[in-house]
Every structure is written in structure tokens, then in C-alpha cells.
Amino acid sequence: MNSVDKGLGTWGSDPKDGLETKQLTQDDDTDEVEIAIDNTAFMDEFFSEIEETRLNIDKISEHVEEAKKLYSIILSAPIPEPKTKDDLEQLTTEIKKRANNVRNKLKSMEKHIEEDEVRSSADLRIRKSQHSVLSRKFVEVMTKYNEAQVDFRERSKGRIQRQLEITGKKTTDEELEEMLESGNPAIFTSGIIDSQISKQALSEIEGRHKDIVRLESSIKELHDMFMDIAMLVENQGAMIDRIENNMDQSVGFVERAVADTKKAVKYQSEARRKKIMIMICCVILAIILASTIGGIFA
């Protein structure tokens, strides 16, 4: 009885203690609900940004395919239509604009992730994963764009070289690069004979030269952007190595890629051939064993 009285006495000694405890628990629950609501709202906003960025990257990919078509049209015509070049210029501007937007979004996401690094949570892992996926996708799309630009530059350079040969001027790759770097096609065109064929060739040479000058400016801007984006995906090793190699040695990129592909196909064919030989040997061995066992039982 005394023990019961003590218990009741302890509980009833100060009614405020019970009320304060109850109120504190309610306040804690309210805080948890508010944190959960705030976190849900934050993740909704994050996924909204992710979707917007993904759509932008998809749009850039579409523009890259359109640019590749325009490159082919320009290369196939001796004197391309001004409208085609204007369309390409607008497309290039749009790609740069969207790429800058994506770059800024990815950097902003990275900053927020770094600020929340101290809190290990499922949300943080999701954000890191989404950021990594988008960064890789962005780099892949922009690498394809750079490849298309490099290919267009090389083919345009080849057209200039052929037109110079028509006018009687033989040039090496080194001499052509010197002309392109100087920004002055007159180094080779000043002595061209004044004839109708030579005039057409001269017009194409000057036009192609302007195309390459504009393209080089775009490639340089992309290079600067890639060096920035490389910091976002620096832990993705092989991909960054490929980007830097692509930017620093852009002229030989396409040829090396083709060579690597041929090598991969060759290795794959050899592996497949070995598998077939092993299977054939197994079949022959099975037939011999079956014949031997059949002879014994017979």
C-alpha cells in the first residue's frame, strides 16, 4: 500500500511535470511533421529541377543531330545557301545557351549536395545519384557535338585543299593549318590566276575558311565549358580522360575512334571464333565417347 501511495504521490506531487512532458512530446511530434513536410517539398523541387535539366539535355541532343545534318548540306554544296549557314548559326547559339543553362544547374546542385554532405540520408544518396547520371549524360551529348564539329572542320579543310589543287596550288596539312591559324586565306590565294574556274574555287576557299574560323571559336567555348564540367564529374575517370583528349587533340579524335572500334570488333570476332572451336571440340569428344561406350555395351 505504501508503495502504491508513493507511486501516486510521485505522479501527483506536481501535475505540471506531466503536462510539460506531454506538451514537449507534442512539440517534438510537430517538429518532426514540419521537417518531413519541408523535406518532401525540397525533394519535389529537386526532382522538378532534375526533370527540367534532363529535358534540356534531350533538346541539346536533338539540336546536335540537326547540326550534323546542316554540316552535311554545307559540305555537299560548293557555295552553300546563306539561309543554311544562318540556320546553323542559330542552332549553334541555341546549343550554347542550353548547355550553359545545364552547366549552371549542375553546379548549383553540386553546391547544395556539398552543403548537405554532413547529413547522411537516403535523400542525399538519391540526389547524388541523379546528379551523377545527369552529369554523365550531359558530357556524352556534348562530346558527340564536339565530334561532329571536329569532323566538319576536317572535311572543310579537305575541301579547301582540293580547291587549292584546282587552282594549281599544292599544300600540305601543315601549311593549311598555318593558313587557318593566321586567319588569312590570302597566304595561298593571292597568286591564283584570274579565270572563271579559279574565281569559283577562290570563293569556296574563302567561304570554307570563314566556316572554320567560326567553328574554332565555338570549339574553344566548348573546351572552356568542358573544363568546368569536368570538375563536376572528376570521379568518373575514364570519361574525363576521353573528354580532355578529345578537346586537346581534336583533329585526330575521329580517326582514333574508328581505329578503336575496328580493334574492338576484331577482338570480339576472335573471341567468338574461339568459343565456336571449343564447342566443336566438345561435340566431337561427346561423339567419340558415345561411340566408345556403345561399342563396349554392344
Image (cartoon, rainbow, N blue to C red):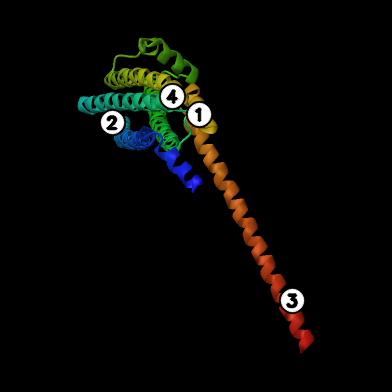
Sequence-first tag of 1 and 2: 2
How much space separates mark 3 and mark 4, taking CA atoms? Answer: 69 Å
Identify the mark nearer the N-term, 3 or 1: 1
For the residues marked 3 and 2, what is the alpha-carbon distance in whole angstroms?
A: 69 Å
In the rendered image, the vertical position of residue 67 relative to residue 276, given as above or below: above
Question: Can you see residue 158?
Answer: no
Residue under numbered circle 1: 240
> Between tags 3 and 4, which lies in front?
4
Write down the residue under mark 2: 77
State if disc 2 and disc 1 touch (CB < 8 Å): no
Which residue shows up at 38% across the image and 37% down it?
A: 18
Q: In this figure, what is the number of numbered marks?
A: 4
Q: Residue at x 35, y 23 (%)?
A: 104
Q: Position of residue 129 (x, y in %)?
A: 44, 37
Q: Are marks 3 and 1 in contact (CB under 8 Å)?
A: no
> Contact, CB < 8 Å: mark 1 with mark 4?
no
Residue 289 badge? 3
Question: Disc 3, disc 4: CB below 8 Å?
Answer: no
For residue 63, what is the image quadrant?
A: top left
Q: Which residue is mark 4?
A: 115
